[in-house]
Amino acid sequence: MGPLDKYILTENALKTNELGFELQFQSHWYRTLPLSCMDFSLKIDGEMIDNNLIKVVANNVSYTYQQLPNLDKEFLFILDKATIQYPKPLKVGQSYEIVFNLDLYIPYILVGAEGKPLLAGSKVEKVLICQ
Amino acid sequence: MNNKIKRGVSLYSYQEEFFLRKMNLEECIAAAAKTGATGIEMIGEQSIVGFPKLTDAFVDQWFGWMDKYGTTPVCHDMFLDTKRFKNKIMTEDEQVESLVRDIKFANRLGFKVIRIIVSTSPEIMERAAPIAEEYNVKLGIEIHSPWHINSAWMTRHHEVMEKTGSKYLGFIPDMGMFTKRLAKVMTDRMIRQGADEKIVEFVCQQHEKAVMAEYIIAEVRQMSQRPIDNAVAELTRHNIYNNPNSLLPFMDKIFHIHAKFYDMQDDYTEYSIPYKEIIEVLKKGGFDGYLSSEYEGNRHIQDVFEVDSVEQVRRQQEMFKRLI
């Protein structure tokens, strides 16, 4: 979307433990949006992460990726982060190339003849050291 | 001297500092109050964790802040999230339900007006009017550029206001509809993104001459195939100018005003929106609501400058003090 994209993933966003890794992200749209209006894809060192295997934790509640489109009442506050969990551990202290696409479907701005929600997409490419 | 116009600040103005955690909600209210503004406008989804739920503790704290800083809750800005699901749009009943949720939210925090997002239909307004009256919260449809007060959509809204006779239905004009000159912060950003400076100059000149947007867009399409150059031309479609006197026949239905601005200069003038002319019209019409600062220049300069919303709002409020 713009210059604030750099805040979507902070330097300590990537963490790991014996069960798998976690990536924390934040939206920078000026108002809170429900999870049903968010979508994302993640690549680590060139490998696409399978969204069917991830969990998304928001407001201390864990959801599967498939649940997201129905979560119209679960809002991610603009100062809060959500966490993606994936069952593959990484190595602490190692650098990883992250490509994270965060797509926001703005539910009150409808565009085109079909009235589709405006897509506000951000692509973040960062090298993060796993914590 | 006309002292009926009151001054307010939308906390939306401080979004950059809020997002970067340089200011919390209380500090935003304090900054607004420091300018001498007394009215507070807020987007619930932006400022309040857990929106639309409100805890008793938060409500107490909110009114505590209002007392502490000598401010009054004036306007809550609502949204109608009609497309929360990819393959389903809200029904009319669901839209009314969503608006009622916002009416109750506004009432609990002491807001007497809700800014209704421009896409809300007159039919929804009509259905919500009795509930707005019950909760003593007025519903003002936002008139946001490229709409203006005589747009067909606003005429339909006006018809519903007349038909129902409800004192709880009215307008909230956004001063972006009086963009006499395109905001330089916008065109400078587009130049940084690669727009042709000569095309930018051409578009700005044409807009100032009040050439119709469609003609400018068509002309630029002949000059360049590059999306960024055509996006500059598109600015003229979304940043319209019409005569501020157009507000006069509707003044009794104007509940509140969004004093949009992009770039307050050192000399306390706004680069693109002629506030001196606008405030003369508001005085002439006897407007007695709040002129509420809405800073939106941040997104056009944040790639190269540190945003200082506090100073920008201070300058606009100083301008209002001098003009009102």
Image (cartoon, coloured by chain):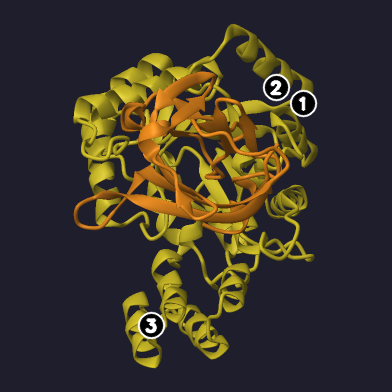
Depth check: give the residue in front, B70 or A8: A8
CB atoms at circles 1 and 2 under 8 Å apart? Answer: yes
Query: Mark 1 — on which chain does it sit?
Result: B
Dot 2 and dot 3 within a common chain: yes
Residue at the (52%, 71%) spot, across then down: B180
**Left or right position of A107 against B315:** left
Chain in orange, by letter, is A
Query: Mark 2 — on which chain does it sit?
Result: B
Q: Is residue B93 above or below residue B264?
A: above
- Disc 3 marks which residue? B216
- Disc 1 marks which residue? B69
Q: Is residue B201 above or below residue B233?
A: below
CA–CA distance between discs 1 and 3?
47 Å
Residue at the (54%, 90%) spot, across then down: B198
- Secondary structure under the numbered disc 1 in the rendered image: helix
Depth check: give the residue in front, B236 or B211: B236
Q: Residues within 10 Å of mark 2 (few under 14, many from 20)?
A: many
Dot 1 and dot 2 within a common chain: yes
- Disc 2 marks which residue? B66
The amino acid type found where label 3 is placed reads Ile
Q: Is residue B215 above or below residue A89?
A: below
Depth check: give the residue in front, B53 or A38: A38
Place residue B151 in its image quadrant: bottom left
